[in-house]
Image: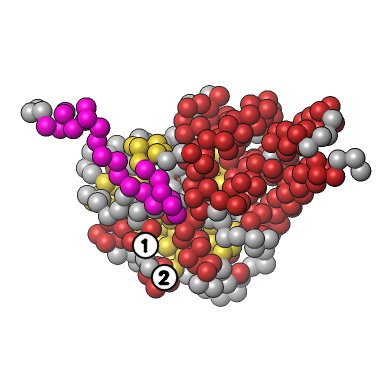
Amino acid sequence: MQHPAAFAVLSLACLWNASAALSLVAISRPRRPCAGEPEGVTVLKPLCGIDTNLRENLRSFFTQDHPRFELLFGVEGEDDPAIAIVRELIAEHPEVSASLVIHRGGRGINPKVSNLRATIERHAPRYDLLLISDSNASVTPSYVRDMESTMRATGAGLVTSVVCAEGAQTLGAALDNAAMNSDVAPGIALLNVTRLHAAVLGKSMLFRHSVLERLGGFESVASLLAEDYVLGRMFAEAGYGVAVAREVVRTPSARTTVRGFFQRHVRWAAMRWRLAPTAALAEPLTRPLAATLVAIALGMPPSIAIGWGLSLMIVRDAVFHGLTRGRRELIGALLTAPLREVAAVMIAVAAPFARDVCWRGKRVRLSAGTRLYLRAPDAGERSRRRSPA
C-alpha cells in the first residue's frame, strides 16, 4: 500500500456513509405493535409568520389517527398572519381538540423557546406527553401514533424524527434540501442508532413535561441557540435515552435563496463547533470532496482520488435521497451535488470564525455552548431610536 494515510481517509468516508445508510434502513423497519393503551399527547406548534405550505402543513395535524391528542398553537402578537389560518382550520375541524394561544412572548432570547414557554403558561397542556413540531413540518395521519408508540416500545425518554426536505424551486432551495436529505438526516440516524451521541432535531421531539421539569424545564434552554441538541443531551445524560421514530417528517422548502442556504448552514456548523469541536473538526472528512482533497495532499494520485470522490458522491447522494425521498427530485439533487460539496468546504472553513449569526431575521452573538447574546444597536439604529417619530 503506497499511500496508507490517504487510503485511511478515504476508507473513513466510505465507512461513515455506509453506516449512515444502514442506520436509515434500520429506522425504517416496521416495529412490533405495542401492547397497552396509547397515552394522550399534547402537540405544541410554535408559529411565526407564513412558512411554505403553512396551511397544508398545519392541516396534516388535524387528521391524526391517534385516539387522544390536542393541538396547541402558540403565536406572539395579534398581528401575526398565521393566526387567520389557524382559526380557519380550527373551525373546519371541530372534532379536534385545538386551541390558539396568543401571547406577548418575552420568555427567552431563543424565540422558539420563548413561544413554547409563553404558550404553556397561558394554556396548561392537557397531557404530560409533549410533542413539539415546527410550523414547516408536514406529516402523515400516523405521525403522532408512531411517535408515541416508539416511546413505549423503546422506553426512551425522548423521541425525535428523521426530517427530509422537498419542493425546491430555486437553486438555494435545491442546495438546502439536498443538504438536509443527504447530510443532516443520515447523520441523525447514524448517531442515534449506533448510540455514538444523542442527536435531536427540534422539528420533531416527544418527551414528558414532568421529566423535563425535573431536568430544568424550558427555562434552562431559553438563551441557547441549539435548544434541541441540549434537550437531547439533558435526557441522555440523565439516563432516559433518545430514540428515532420510524416515520420521516417532511419539510417543504421551495424558495430559499443561495444566501439563505449559506446563512443557515454556517449557523448550524458554528453551533456544532461550539458544542463538539473535535467532532466538528473531523466532520469534513466524511464528505467526498474534503476527503478527496486530503487524500491528494497525502500523496494519492489526483486521478485516483478524484475518481473515488466522484463515485462516492453519486452513490451516497442517490442512496440517501432514495431512503428519505424516494425517486422524487433525485435528478436535481444529483446535479447540485458537486456545488453542494464545494459549499460544504466553504462552510466548514467559515464556521469556526462565525461569532454573529443571522437567525429569524436578526443578528445575534453566538458564544460557548451556543449561548445567545443580544447585540447592542449600532450608531445608526441608536440615532433612529432617539429621533422623534
Indicate the secondary structure of the residue bearing disc 1: helix
Viewer-closest of 210 and 280: 280
Q: Which residues are magenta?
A: 365-386
Q: At x 85% / y 45%, what residue is drawn?
A: 4
Q: At x 51% / y 26%, what residue is drawn?
A: 258
Please state which amino acid type lies under the numbered disc 2.
Leu
381 part of magenta stretch: yes
Viewer-closest of 216 and 301: 301
Place residue 154 in its image quadrant: bottom right
Residue 282 x %, y %? 65, 47
Mark 1 burial class by Cα count in 10 Å: few <14, some 14-19, many 20+: some
Q: CA distance from mark 2 to mark 1?
A: 9 Å
Residue 265 x %, y %? 52, 38
Mark 1 — residue?
220
Q: At x 78% / y 33%, what residue is drawn?
A: 296
Q: Quadrant of the C terminus?
A: top left
Viewer-closest of 172 and 95: 172
Mark 2 — residue?
215
Place residue 13 in its image quadrant: top right
Is 70 left, or right, of 271 in this rendering? left
Residue 40 x %, y %? 44, 67
Is 306 left, or right, of 127 in this rendering? right
Q: At x 76% / y 47%, what residue is drawn?
A: 12
